[in-house]
Amino acid sequence: MTGNNKYKVLLVGNPNVGKSLLFYHITGKYASVSNYPGTTVAITKGVAKIGSHHELEVIDTPGFYNMITITEEEAVTKRIIFEEKPDVILHVIDAKNIERMLPLTLQLLEANLPVILVLNMYDELKRRGLEIELSHLEHDLGIPVVCTIATKKYGIDNLISRIISVAEKRYKFQPIKIGYSTLVEDAITRVVELIKNEYPISKRSLATLLLQGDVEAYKLIDKEEAVDEISKFAGGFVKNDISLKIAYDRHRMAVDIIGENIYENEKKKVSGIKNLLDKLTLHPIFGFIAVFIILYFGFYKFVGGFGAGTLVDLIETNLFEEIINPYVNSFFSKILGDSIFFSLFAGDYGIITLGVRYAFAIVLPVVSTFFLMFSVIEDSGFLVRISMLLDKILKKIGLSGRSVIPLILGLGCGTMATVVTRTLETKRERYLVTFLLALTIPCSAQLGVILGLLGGSFSMLMIWFVSILVIFLISGFVLNKYTKGEQATFFMEIPPIRMPKLGNVMVKTFSRLKWYAFEIIPIFIYASALIWIGKITKIFDFLTYILTFPAKWAGLPDKMGEIFLYGFFRRDFGAAGLYDIQDIMTNKQLVVASVVLTLFVPCIAQFAVMIKERGLKTSIFIFLSVIPFAFIFGMILNSILGIWGY
Amino acid sequence: MNLIEAKLNETYIVESIDSKDDNAMKKLLSMGILPGTELKVLQKKPTIVFEVYHSRFAIDNSLGEKVYVTKNHPQG
């Protein structure tokens, strides 16, 4: 063999089947263990060197249910299948759900693609008392079938050797022919006759897509084809529920194949405690209680108390204030003297003394404890339960249960959450969530400081919390009323409650932190530089001056103007600035300032991502409506608290 | 009857799916819901939860009302 052989391997399949973890085991690079739809939204590529002369380029695709695609993510996967010409496609499925997932395997092999069926979570199938006739199943389908347990690294070597043999075309595919009922079969035959050229997928597969009116399939076929004739012919079938008929035939075939190859070994019962916990967390009353318990201990106690309290104190006070900052200040004053460059690096707003300090002392502890907690509730299957429990309530403000995921993630980082809105199904819901993230949801950096400021007094914290909740509901309600489009529907698979695996949780937390470190922390540093430029050019003084007016109207000290301005460059700069001046403020001012700052425009990073995801026009609209809203509410709250005599 | 009217802890056979809403139908198909599929209603509040094959799904009423079911009479 000469030189390197590079092969392209594609991972496809439903969400929640362990694709990302398999990707990690094959490539050794971590993507993100996708448990909620969204972690694999961006296409992840990795390279694996196998021996001395094989190289696999592995591409992890977003969740994929059917060749007829619903969401944008699925369409992306289909486009990759069409365009990338993979040497091997791994269809990863959850072994115990083979009945539901095999129809997609059938579609892939009907398309004449080099598919390997990967039965992942093989242990869960066994645990259900099911047995599989592997070699027989492989024979029936005519494609390689491999069992794996990604969480335990089981079956990976075998999988890699099958990948190589398929890539080198040493495996003889004899894919089973998918038979349809006469009506469908005749229609397919007719369309196949009309297709002249060759495409990345078989004519037969293309014909089924065209018959179902699939947009991407029509985009795929050349202009010289008899497009009009095909679409006219297909039109009659689309009206006649052809999708349902096709799906039904494939499904029946899948059931037949499975009937012959999977049998029940013995009835096994799941453990009593697990079962009880599973039921309770889904229960309309106990489920909510469980949500509150998790929120209280997980977020309030662990993230708020331990992360934002203990850890921040430790790093901020003991490390930065006492050791690093004095050292940095004296170091730069020695080499730069009193010049303006001194304040670029050191002093009150220097890159090191402010940018790096906030990044490591305030944001890092809070964000890491938050992401750790988030990974735990995600992997345990709890996040899905929160979505399901809150769906009905969220419907009242035009959202679906699915939006719980970006909204909760927003409590960690609004920028990341804005990216994750991609997983929502309708444009309308994505817009609504983006707006609410910009206006109401405090990110963990803000949350950390606010908990630190108000945490000492329960009544202050409650006033802040209730204010934000009320605004969340009111703005949600108003936005829902005045935004065009249809209400999003909700459906979600509910995984069993599982004990999260420490390794997976750590890896996932770490990959999110890494994202944060590479995407967000540099912006911190740039923002420090911007603040420096703004200060020496006096532009900031002017903007600060303007912002002191609305601050005054809401009964806040002048210094708040400056904090609001920094709040844009980093929401947490603002919050941390508030932290620094807490001594000169009354309790009422502190609450009002916390609320206004939470509502005030998102940080510069989130704004940039908003523009990327929602477009410039929408982002500016959101931006400009948030500013007056924040101050008007601040004034209202100030008056209410005044009347109340707080 | 549709899935909203179905009773808790009962097993049903899917009779038909309302195919007027193309998007809703695709979603139901992706869950493996087809005429003839057997499903068990596990919960109705706050959303419908049912078991199909070995998975559980939560769906809202707007999808639930599109699935028509009949009671499954155990045979023999």
Image (cartoon, coloured by chain):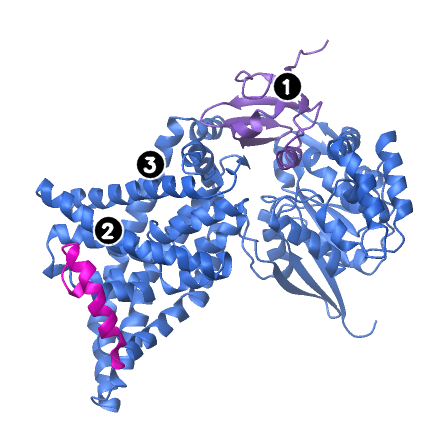
Q: In the image, which disc is placed on residue A632?
A: 2
- Circle 2 or circle 3, nearest the eye: 2
Give the residue type that dot 3 points to: Ile
Question: Label 1: how many residues lie within 10 Å, few (<14), some (14-19) or many (20+)?
Answer: many
Q: Is residue A503 left or right of residue A583?
A: right
The blue-coloured chain is labelled: A
* Residue positioned 27% across, 81% down in the render: A537
Question: Label 3: how many residues lie within 10 Å, few (<14), some (14-19) or many (20+)?
Answer: few
Q: Nearer the viewer, residue A476 or A26?
A: A476
Q: Residue tagged by mark 3?
A: A293
Pointer 2 or 3: first along the chain: 3
Q: Colour of chain B?
A: purple
The location of residue A410, given as percent across then percent down, is 39, 51
- Circle 3 or circle 1, nearest the eye: 1
Inter-mark Cα distance, 3 to 1: 37 Å
Residue A158 appears in view: no
Magenta range is A535-560
Q: Is residue A59 left or right of residue A425?
A: right
- Circle 2 or circle 1, nearest the eye: 2
Q: Secondary structure at mark 2?
A: helix
**Circle 3/circle 1 CB separation < 8 Å:** no
Give the residue type that dot 2 points to: Ile
Inter-mark Cα distance, 2 to 3: 34 Å
Q: Secondary structure at mark 3?
A: helix
Question: For the residues tagged 2 and 3, is the chain the same?
Answer: yes
**Circle 2/circle 3 CB separation < 8 Å:** no
Check the image and report above or below for A420 versus A120.
below
Q: In the image, which disc is placed on residue B69?
A: 1
